[in-house]
Amino acid sequence: MTSHEQPSLIKVITTDFIYNAKIPLILLVMVLISAMLVVITTYRTRLLTAERERLLLEKEALDIEWRNLILEENALSTHNRIERIASEKLKMQPVNPLQENIIIKKYF
């Protein structure tokens, strides 16, 4: 560099920061890292909130399906239905009281 050339302003500022302002430079880097971490944390929080909402909707749908299945189970297990299936599909009939035989076993 010749004596009549002026140094670049960017070079002067960079050199000044490196040699004389280490603490502000470190703080600047830490602030930038902190800002990036805030952005990343906010993004992940939004993703998790959306996932939670989706899971709550799925839970509600499963609860409704479970209630419907309980109602169906109760309807299918009623006594009248069992009697109807026994008489129609299995051709079972109620026992005539005259045809009943009662066996009593006595223990001595």
Image (cartoon, rainbow, N blue to C red):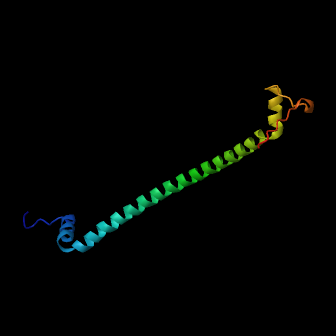
Question: Residue drawn 20% across and 66% down?
Answer: 14
Where, by quadrant of the figure, is residue 77 drawn? top right
| As drawn, 46 above or below 95 | below
Which quarter shows the N terminus?
A: bottom left
Report the front residue among 47 and 71. 71
Q: Is residue 26 left or right of residue 105?
A: left
- List the single residue furthest toward the left: 2
Where, by quadrant of the figure, is residue 75 drawn? top right
Q: Position of residue 30 (x, y in %)?
A: 31, 67
| As drawn, 93 above or below 25 | above
Question: Total number of numbered labels?
Answer: 0
Question: Residue drawn 7% across and 67% down?
Answer: 3
Q: Position of residue 60 (x, y in %)?
A: 64, 50
Q: Is residue 80 left or right of residue 25?
A: right
Q: Position of residue 34 (x, y in %)?
A: 36, 65
- List the single residue furthest toward the front: 108
Which quarter shows the C terminus?
A: top right
Report the front residue among 7 and 89. 89
Question: Residue drawn 17% across and 71% down?
Answer: 19
Q: Position of residue 2 (x, y in %)?
A: 7, 64
Report the front residue among 57 and 11. 57
